[in-house]
Amino acid sequence: MPDILLDEAAAVEGSAKTVHASLELLDLPAMAGPGGHGLAGKFIGRLREMEALAVVLRSFESELVPDDESGIDPITQAETLLLELALADADVFERKRERVAKEARADPSRRPEAAAIGTAVELLTEGIALRTREWSDQELAAFRDLAPITLKPAVWVVNVAEDEDGAAALGEAVRAIVPQGDTVVTVSAELEEEGARLDPDDRAEMFEGLGLGEGAMATMVRATYDALGLLSFYTLGPTEAHAWTVRRGATAKEAAGKIHSDLERGFIRAEVAHMPDVIAAGGWDPAKAAGAMRLEGKEYQVVEGDVLLIRFSV
């Protein structure tokens, strides 16, 4: 995860080591478009293991990259993939529905599970992703062992040509057809490739001059991070400046467990400061001396940019 605050904090604290938060991305072979072969079953299986999907839609022409199968229309690609993934889930849910319906006839306690799976099948066979509606905890429990792909958060990445004038309009067109709440970003991997050949300062200057911010990779990673409902909190000291990943809404005690299980088990309290305040003060100790630090208990909900020092006893 690109993180300017972490880098600045490590510099003012004089940390010997800097550890950024990270995401692991599995790059699967491209899906063929209409008339192609789609996603092979083994790749569908890998998607079920993932926590989120980042779908790259092609919207550029290049002699170096044939487009015979996928085409260059991101709308068609998105529609095709939405349908294919829904039908892949429908196949799995249909098999489960037959089994659960039979069990529910003998055991009334299974009827809510059977009803939830039946409702899911109706949506999926119409090509509708499960994440388009809200499900109760009981219904989600009925789906858990099926690992539905269409329930996972999704980021749609429209990969446009370097000189694409209608990039914003393309992004809006894709946003109009994907499930509400899905994230859509528009990037140019071609420009990212050119920037990769430059040293970091020249690359940053190039991206800034073109209005690309941190570049395509950083944009995609941040969007995926947000879609997963994650935030970063920090630990800071002369030995190491470390960014940690936790779900939004996590408590200080849960965050402590991300650092080490002993910290969660023996949690007493957390000393908390906001990262910009720590940087402005010149480090953790000066920030604490300036009164920027406060004490929080185990139920405190961590927010983006918190620096934590955990007090514990085991």
Image (spheres, rainbow, N blue to C red):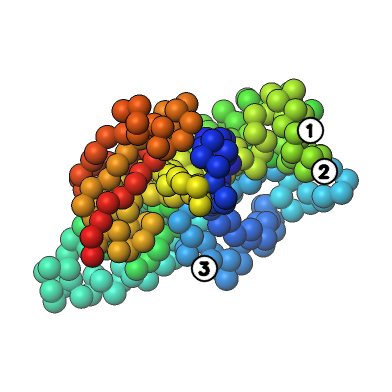
In the displayed structure, 219 sits above or below 100; it is above
Q: Position of residue 111 (x, y in %)?
A: 17, 64
How far apart are labels 3 and 1 at the CA level? 41 Å
Q: Considering only order in the chain, which callout, 1 or 3, is on the residue closer to the N terminus?
A: 3
- Going by the numbered disc 2, the residue's amino acid type is Arg
Q: Which residue is mark 3?
A: 45
How many neighbours does mark 1 have within 10 angstroms: few (below 14), some (14-19), or many (20 or more)?
few
- In front here: 171 or 290? 290
Left or right of 235 in this view: 118: left
- Going by the numbered disc 3, the residue's amino acid type is Gly
Q: Are marks 2 and 1 in contact (CB under 8 Å)?
A: no
Q: Position of residue 136 (x, y in %)?
A: 23, 50
In the displayed structure, 273 sits above or below 69; it is above
Task: Kindly identify which numbered label has been placed on residue 202.
Answer: 1
Q: Are marks 3 and 2 in contact (CB under 8 Å)?
A: no
Tell me the residue at 52%/61% (across/down): 47
Q: Secondary structure at mark 3?
A: helix
Left or right of 113 in this view: 51: right
- Going by the numbered disc 1, the residue's amino acid type is Asp
| Residue 86 in sight here | no
Q: Secondary structure at mark 2?
A: loop
In the displayed structure, 256 sits above or below 155; it is below
Q: Which residue is mark 2?
A: 197
Tell me the residue at 47%/26% (across/down): 280
